Image (tube, grey):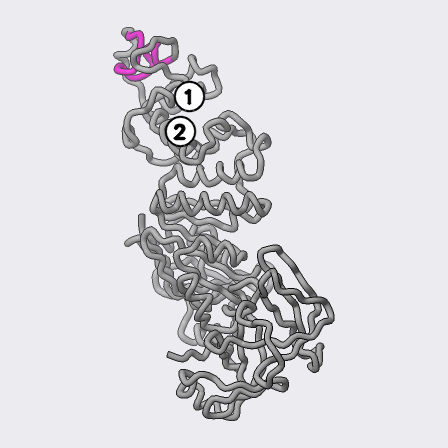
Amino acid sequence: MAQVVLENIYKSFPDRQGERAVVPVATPPLLTADELQLADSDPTTNRLGTNVLRRINLTVVDGEFMVLVGPSGCGKSTLLRLIAGLEEMTGGNIWVGKRLVNDLPPKERDIAMVFQNYALYPHMTVYDNLAFGLRRTKLGNGELGAPTQWSQRRAGVPPVEATGVGLGAWGMGSRENSAFPTPYSLLPISKWAENLLVGMTRSLPKGLRYVNERERSVDQQVCHVAALLQIEALLNRLPKQLSGGQKQRVALGRAIARNPQVFLMDEPLSNLDAKLRAETRAQIVKLQRQLGTTTIYVTHDQTEAMTMGDRIAVMCAGSIQQVAHPLELYNRPATRFVAEFIGSPPMNFLPVQFHAPLLIIHPQFRLKLPEVWATVLQKYDGQSLILGIRPEHLSLSVAASKNLLVQVDLVEALGNETYLSVNPSESDLTATASLQVRIAPDQVARIGEQLWLSLALDKIHFFDPDTGLAIWHH
């Protein structure tokens, strides 16, 4: 296992077809100080082309489950491909453990990736899909321990105490595994010939296959992963004979079988239905904790991010907005974007005026803030602020100057809770976005009804209207 460190990562694509915006990546940054300043001043374009990633700095500690979340097009999948070596960086460094992997090809980075579309080989069985990567790695003989009798039978090799006929029994395998030693077993067999025999006889009936020690190790690892994912009954099937959830487990198994230092997962659940997505989500979390492998998981679903990640990195327009634990993101968002993206339904926002020492004025209500806001808001006296409040922190109340009068536009009763979409009664509907309110299921509201809402003062958030940064009290 290993930690992953991203240092000042930049990625640009050329604006014109055929123009090359990147050069071979080396350890020093590829952008000059002037170019970095230009890229920071304009997050969308620079002389190198279109910036899709800019100034990415992130450390994923050993064994951590890190989730990259953000809207479509924010650069999260591109960042994952940079880590895997499938894309070329414009600038920056990527460390996996103690190795700088900028110049290493994907196969030498000791990273396994699970793709959104599964990427299974359609002509291979589940067993061969799981074994494909292992057969092309430096899997040492005996590294995985002695094979079980079940795995020997699966590979078509009789157990030690059993008898049978196979190429190994005719003197073409190792002497100690030969059921019927002959003078041919004394003949040496070269490595390339051994591998050739394994490949040539792999499609033959089990009793006629040549199985060397390397193939036994591969078989043991495949059987172990199949048992871990509970897909032993699927090993002889082709991908076209599998359901979506089964294909996803096979794709996960192919990554797990290699026992890499890092797992990369690019929206692996997006093609599954809601129920299967929830089940597979729980399986992935359980497997990651069991294996302890450093994992970077990409999704645009904030529910997946909140329930799966040890920490979450929220991305927007090619940059990281905030990195924190799930509940910290929810309770103390660093920017208005994070506050709006994390949470379902999202946070509500209202433009207000602040007047010292603690007065908040809105066209339809005014309220006095708790004393904890006095110091931090002092410099905003007489200025506009953005007030944020989550749907569950608005509650039905009575008429009062500190409460907000709204009209119900939509009612969504889910059984365990009810969501209301409301608008301030006397506001210009074209200028004010609808507010979302979460109420108890036994509370009744009807479309067109006018309600008074009270705000939980200890749950209010404030944001700078110019920068979008959160204003926090201590």
Residues at marks 1 and 2, CA–CA distance in whole angstroms = 9 Å
Residue 149: image quadrant is: top left
Rendered residue at 34%/8% (across/down): 163
Over which residues does the magenta segment extend? 167-181
Residue at point 41%, 72% (across, down): 32
Tell me the kind of residue under disc 2: Cys
| Mark 1 and mark 2 residues within 8 Å of each other at the beta carbon | yes
Q: Mark 1 or 2 closer to N-term?
A: 1
Q: Nearer the viewer, residue 162 or 302?
A: 302
Q: Percent from the top left, x then y, of residue 315?
A: 49, 64
Query: Is residue 193 something that shows in the picture?
Result: no
Looking at the rendered image, the quarter that the C terminus falls into is: bottom left
Q: Nearer the viewer, residue 392 or 304?
A: 392
Determine whether the residue tagged by mark 1 lies in a helix, strand or loop.
Answer: helix
Rendering quarter of residue 153: top left
Label 1 Cα crowd, 10 Å radius (few <14 / some 14-19 / many 20+): some
Whether 213 is among the magenta residues is: no
Q: Is residue 452 above or below residue 391?
A: below
Residue 232 location in percent, x, y? 45, 28
Is 6 left or right of 161, judged from the image as shown?
A: right
- Look at the image and tell me whether residue 251 can be seen: yes
Q: Position of residue 231 (x, y in %)?
A: 47, 31
Q: Which mark is residue 154?
A: 1
Instruction: Tell me if residue 179 is in the magenta stretch.
Output: yes
